[in-house]
Image (cartoon, helix red, strand yellow):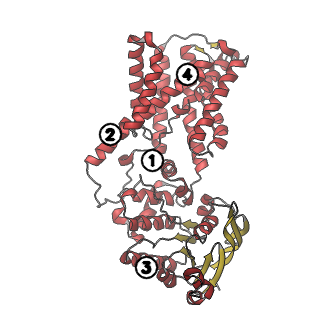
Amino acid sequence: MAETILKVQDVVKTFGGLHAVNRVTFDLAEGEVMGLIGPNGAGKTTLFNVISGYYPPTQGRIHFKGQDVSGVPPYKLAAIGIGRTFQVVKPFPGLSVLENVIIAGLCRYGTRRASEKHAWKILDFTGLADQADKSAANLTLAGRKRLEISKALALEPSLLLLDEVVAGLNPTEADKTIELILKIKGFGISILIVEHIMRVIMNLSDRVVVLNFGQQIALGKPADVARDPMVIQAYFGEDAA
Amino acid sequence: MFFGVGAYTTAILMKLGGWAFILTVPLGGLFAGILAFFVGLPTLRLKGSYFAIGTWALALALQQLALILDITGGPDGMRLPPYLNPSYFYYWMLGVVGGTFALYWILLEWAPFGLKVRAIREDQDGAMALGINPTRVKVQSFVLSAVPVGLLGSIYAYWITFIDPLSAFGDILTDQAVVMAVVGGLGTLIGPAIGAVIVFTFKTLFWAYLSDYQVLYLIILGVAIALTVLFLPNGLWGTFINYRDSSRGMRTQSVSRPRIDASEHSDEQEKGAPEHG
């Protein structure tokens, strides 16, 4: 078994009286792809925001590479190797695609020149090189999602958090993105991926965590989780179970 | 506010300490920078207009302080030994402004710093995910914008030979600076310079021909801001750049590799301190 890279321990996040994430616990091994699924409002994005430092956990601890990173701000996590994308993509619209990726590379490669060289490699890899000069605001949705991945990759992360990078794409674009994620996995980067499209999760994930109303209701291999009565009930209601 | 700090630094050191003018100028810049650091650290964590309100309140507090302290001469202000040599001061100011412009150009257009500043302006959460510490970059920008203003305040004090709380910490100075930046174009290096030329041309003409109607001056400045924000939100220079870029047509998709193109979007945030004068 490979080393554990991410350890999520009893993590709780409340907003007022609402338990958006309630006692979630799982480990992610080095090189593993973990799917994070659940119905709308299950707390997936909140959990992402807690792991990536945007919200401190109300309770529980998060360890990354053996180091307690609970409540550490996002920019420090980015520097030690946690890259993330946003469900609502966050390009810097007034800047070119290339500049967007250069900025991401700055924290690894101090100078603009070195970071630009690195950015070109990333853009070649993600297939955005021919649009490098475009303003990020002029990209299609598929392009913007790819840009999100490019920026996260430019950090040279050892853990990548992907928040719905496939949702909203047409089938051809979706296949290309799945292929891209598999290539990223091939580099040995651990991935935690949120996605609504089951086909994507089933194809990509080694294991799956299922959340419902903030609670962790299942954890296991995709095929097993898909047969879990609790999961079926969460997705399809009482009758189906 | 940083202008006043520079002005009073020079006035106090020259008058009470008997320092040479040359030595007081760097200190004026230094004190402005130090103040910016300690003010920026807490206030730059605030979002949106709270930061502006916070610094505005602090400027008023400093003005009040200058009014009651003995060392600043209170409401009577301070008179410095006159040195009547306009070109001397002209070259001092030209030097500071030129140096500032060159420094800002290097930092914002060429160094990584400019990209970080733009990233934060475009999307702060997105910037944090890429390893950028927004508060840190903002404090750096704030200090960077305060130092030249402090230097100019120092020079101003000796040039005009008289400062009081109103002239050093007054809002007319700040208001003018805001008009310059907004009319010229926020987030550009050239814009505020254009705005400054316009405001000062107007000011000179106004005092020459309309000085009986002083009250109109601030009203006209206010109207100028309102109209610019409504009809030319990017300011004169920003509008010109947008027009130029769009008339060149959409950017083509063919890219000539290795190139760094900052000139096409010269929308670097000019952390042009005047706003916080």
3 vs 4, front mark:
3
- Gap in Å between the C-alphas at discs 1 and 4? 29 Å
Q: Chain of mark 2?
A: B
Q: Please identify, in this view, whether the residue under mark 3 or under mark 1 is nearer the observer.
A: 3
Query: Disc 1 sits on a residue from what chain?
Result: B
Whole-percent x, y for residue A87 in the image: 50, 66
Say if B153 sits above or below B110 in the image: above
CB contact under 8 Å: marks 2 and 4: no
**In this rendering, position of residue B270 left or right of residue A128:** right
Name the residue rendered at 48%, 31% in the picture.
B178
Tag 1 residue: B110
Which chain letter matches label 3?
A
Which type of secondary structure does the marked residue at label 2 adopt?
Answer: helix
Which image quarter: residue A178?
bottom left
Count how many numbered circles sit on residues in the image: 4
The x, y position of residue A29, in whole percent, is 63, 80
Q: Look at the image and tell me in which quarter the C terminus of chain B lies.
A: top right
Residue B241, percent from left and from top? 33, 42
Position of A80 compared to A110: left or right? right
Q: What residue sits 65% from the left and 72% below the top? A: A214
Residue that carries the numbered disc 4 in the rendered image: B155
Identify the residue under disc 2: B240
Nearer the observer: mark 2 or 1; the answer is: 2
Could you tell me the amino acid type at mark 3? Answer: Glu
Residue identifier under label 3: A179
Q: A177 or A88: nearer the eye?
A: A88
Hey, what amino acid is under mark 2?
Phe
- Vertical comparison of B182 with A198: above or below: above
Say above or below: B193 vs B7. Answer: below
**Do the residues indicated by labels 1 and 4 lie within the same chain of the protein?**
yes
